Image (cartoon, rainbow, N blue to C red):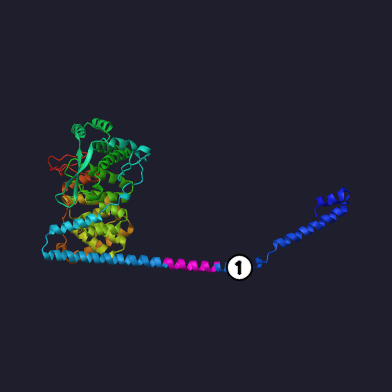
Amino acid sequence: MSTRYMKKLFGNDIDKEQNKELEDEINDLHIEREIKKSFNVFDLLNENCENDIEDTDEVKIGEQEQNCNKMSKSKKKKKTRQKHAYEIDKEIDKEMNKQLMESRLSAGLSSSQIITKKRRLTREILMVECKVYVYPKIFQNKLKTRPHNKYLRKTWLVSAHEKNIDVASRSGLSMYVTESISFPTRLHFNYKYNHSYNQIQIQFYQAVVSSDIQTIFNIAHAHPYHVDSLLHCANFYKITYNLAMSAKFIEQALFYLEYAFHPKFMKNYLMDYNRKENRALFIALFKRLILVGDLSFYRTSLELCKLLMLLDSDDPLAVSLMIDFYAIRSKEYEWFCEFCDSTYLTRNLNIIYSLSLAYFYLGKYETANEYLQKALFTYPTVLIPLLEACNQRIDSKIISHKFFCERPYGITMKLQEIYIARCSSLWKKAETLRWLVKQTEIILNEINANDGPTLIKQRGIKRDAYHLSFKSVLRHVVLSDLKDVTVTAQELQSGDTIYPHDPLPPRDDT
């Protein structure tokens, strides 16, 4: 009973003691009711269930751990099986290719047909990964999208700028398709100028002949889509050690060239270097490649090398002299070995030395030893300057031996200088130097036991078997700007000119 109810019954005359006693009784009744309400028979069952749940949870956790271990083991087994199957497929493909070559030779097929088959294989291996084109945007600004330019053309070589897009639509540079004579099944692409662009090109040629650099800068400012003037300005900034501005002009030139691409161009990649209009793309890609490589983005440089080799199979800029360097720097050893197996470039000086390095890094030491010995037999004069560039102490036996002291001449001398200037850093590790010295000792023992020329004939080694023209090698030297490698006046023919936008143009240009 509550105090209010008691007051209504008895009024305010009730004693304080009686009130206390009544309050105590009421509190006791409330406590008993609460205890009865809180007590539940099913709580006993719940306690047992909780204990069972804890036990089952522990069991489930143990089962899950076992299942995870089983899954990881099965995944590892699958990976090893896939690797094993991939290696078996590779061996089968190699054996099949050998059998096909033998059957074609026995059937009386010409060597040109076999070479075309090899070219197809190289085009498959040289397929470019477009995701690796655009390196981290050091000198680039991101495009600010607006509602009216929502559907912009995608670019792979460089990122687009909003101002450049408006100018590119009225540049006067375009691309058209023709049929290829050497590859009838493939499309051949060429650039084309309209009338206004042609007039700007004439003004540019006059400024180049008169060596008027200010006029060239004025053309680049008034017509920012003119590619040759942009390349000329980029070369000027490179000479003055302003690399940021040089990179900006190269990217701008590449953007306008890419904006004029034919829709089918990214699937075919075939272009003639002998045409004046096409040469700007080759030179811009080459300069971009070296700039990116200097910033240590070697994989991007490798992809650009692939693209340049796909554009023209004659390799007019001698990109094959640098593809080995970027392949090893980007640790693409397996790809480089496959590329060398499917091409005719294994006789080249740089390829055969770098191929031995690739097999060495893959852990295939027997094949690496074979290729290095073959390289030292084919081009022995590389050894002493290579060891000097690596700051390695040279044994007196090697210095005094005639086999390694012969002086190279002609294109061999130039290729040797290029390889040592570019690739000597690949051999500076202690492991590789020890391996190089060990193999030279083995070769010295063989030469001392037998005659050097007879050993070369027995091994079937062919010296000076190059697939590059001397002019393309000189173009490579001019554009790459390597240390201690220059083009002398004696190496140039009469009528040869070296322009920054077009070094040593071919005689049969159109």
User: Secondary structure under badge 1?
Assistant: helix
Asked if residue 7 is positioned above or below residue 255 in the image, the reply reads: below
Residue 73 lies in the magenta stretch: no
Residue drawn at the location 82% of the way across and 55% of the way down? 23
In the image, 55 versus 110, the foreground residue is: 55
For disc 1, the neighbor class at 10 Å (few under 14, some 14 to 19, many from 20) is few
How far across and how far down the image is residue 450, in percent? 17, 66
Indicate the quadrant containing the C terminus: top left, top right, bottom left or bottom right.
Answer: top left
* Location of residue 76 by image quarter: bottom left
Where does residue 50 sit, x and y in percent of width and height? Answer: 60, 66
Q: Where residue 32 sits in the image (x, y, percent)?
A: 76, 61
- Judged by its main secondary structure, the magenta piece is helix
Residue underneath mark 1: 49
Magenta run includes residue 64: yes
Q: Name the outermost residue toward the front.
A: 9
The answer to whether 205 is drawn above or below residue 74 in the figure is: above
Asked whether residue 448 appears in the rendered view, the answer is no
298 to the left or right of 281: right
Residue at 34 percent across and 67 percent down: it is 81
Of residues 98 and 172, the one drawn nearer to the viewer in this rendering: 172
Farthest residue toward the left?
108
Relative to the observer, which residue lies in front, 143 or 342?
143
What residue span does the magenta drawing correspond to? Answer: 57-72
Q: Which of the pair 284/448 is nearer the observer?
A: 284
Report if residue 55 is visible in the image.
yes
Q: Is residue 504 above or below residue 107?
A: above
Which image quadrant: the N terminus?
Answer: bottom right
Q: Quadrant of residue 142?
A: top left
Q: Amino acid at mark 1?
A: Cys
- Residue 443, given in percent of the width and then of the height, sits at 22, 63
The number of numbered badges drawn on the structure is: 1
